[in-house]
Structures are given as structure tokens and as C-alpha cells.
Amino acid sequence: MSENHSIDPPVTVIISRRVKPGCKAAFEEFISGITAAAMTFEGHLGTNVFRPSSPENNEYQIIFKFDRASNLRIWQESECRRQWLARAESLRLEPPTIRVITGLETWFTLPSPKPIIPPPRYKMATITLLAIFPLIQLANLVLIPLFKPLPPLLRSLIITGIIVLLMTYVVMPRMTKLFSRWLYPQKR
């Protein structure tokens, strides 16, 4: 399964679009429609929209997440998506900027209206080690005794699932914020 994940990894697409003045209401309708359409495609994990931070600002950030690159490709090549993008063509000032990120890079995404270049891999590995080591120690102390009656493979699957969920939703967002100056030194 991990071999398949390396060939067909989860992906996040970050799209920056600058909207023509006076077209924000129409663009909001476009966002609602394309988001609803994307949700009907297999592997779609969610969409986040970062709206302009002020009335003078006209840049939207739209983030689509898919469980596999192959499912993203199906969405990107679909007639449904093509039709939605054609509707938005007259609303934009310039072609959108599109970035696709995979793997650990998605753990190191700070909430920001602007896309951020992921930090170097050695920094991501260091922060991941600092985050996962205490979780594994905690799992050894608390979770293994708790799930001891279960078969070893099932116990390992459950504990790994708990660690992955904690890393993704609790630990890594906090670690990324805590170490943001080191991970993103140019952001000062």
C-alpha cells in the first residue's frame, strides 16, 4: 500500500486567482458551483477558500485536496471542471497561478492567503522527528497496554491510525506554527 502511495500520493492543489473589479459576487457563485462539483468526484477530500483580506484586494486562494494524484487528474480532465472554468474566464484579470503539492509538504502548510513554498526537506524531517518521537513514546506507554488484548496486527493498525490522525490534525499544525521562524525564515 505504501508503494502505491508513493506512485499515486495524496495531493493538494493551491490556485491563486485575481478577480476583475465588480466581479466578486459572480466569482463567489463560481466558487460555490465548482466546489460543489468537485465534491462529487471520487477522492475529493475538501476545499478551502481564502477570500481577499480587504476590499482593495482581489486575490482568492482556492485549495483542493484529493486522496490520490490519479483522482485529481480525473477531476482536472473532466468536462464538468472545463465547463466551470469556462464560466470563470470572463471574471479573471490574469491566468491563475496553480501549485500542486504532495506528501509531507501538506503537513507544513501555514494558514495564509498567499501560497508558501514548502521548507527544505531536512527541516521537514527534523520537525517530523521532533513531533513523532514523543507520540510513539506516549503510544508505547498508554495505547499498547490499552489495546494489548487485540491481535498484534490490528493493534498496530489502530495505534498507527491514531498517531497519523494526531500528527495531521493536532501536532503538525502546532509544530509548524511553533517553528515557523526556522521553517520559513524569509517570512519575517
Image (cartoon, grey):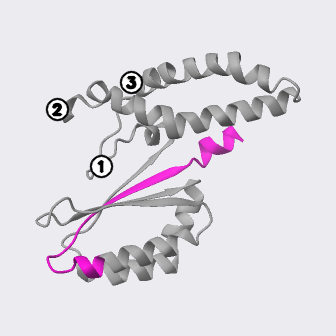
- Separation of disc 3 and disc 1 at Cα? 18 Å
Choose the circle earlier in sequence order: 1 or 2: 1
Q: Which mark is residue 123?
A: 3
Q: Which amino acid, by three-letter code, is at mark 3?
A: Lys
Q: Is residue 14 magenta?
A: yes
Query: Would you name the residue on which mark 2 appears?
Result: 188
Residue 185: x and y in percent read 23, 28
117 relative position to 160: left or right: left
Q: Which mark is residue 87?
A: none
Q: Which amino acid, by three-letter code, is at mark 1?
A: Pro
Q: Secondary structure beneath disc 1?
A: loop
Circle 2: is it few (<14), some (14-19), or many (20+) Cα within 10 Å? few
Choose the circle earlier in sequence order: 2 or 3: 3
Q: Residue furthest left?
A: 56
Q: Nearer the viewer, residue 129 or 94?
A: 129
- Separation of disc 2 and disc 3 at Cα? 17 Å
Q: Nearer the viewer, residue 90 or 140?
A: 140
Q: Which mark is residue 115?
A: 1
Q: How many marks?
A: 3
Q: Which residues are magenta?
A: 1-27
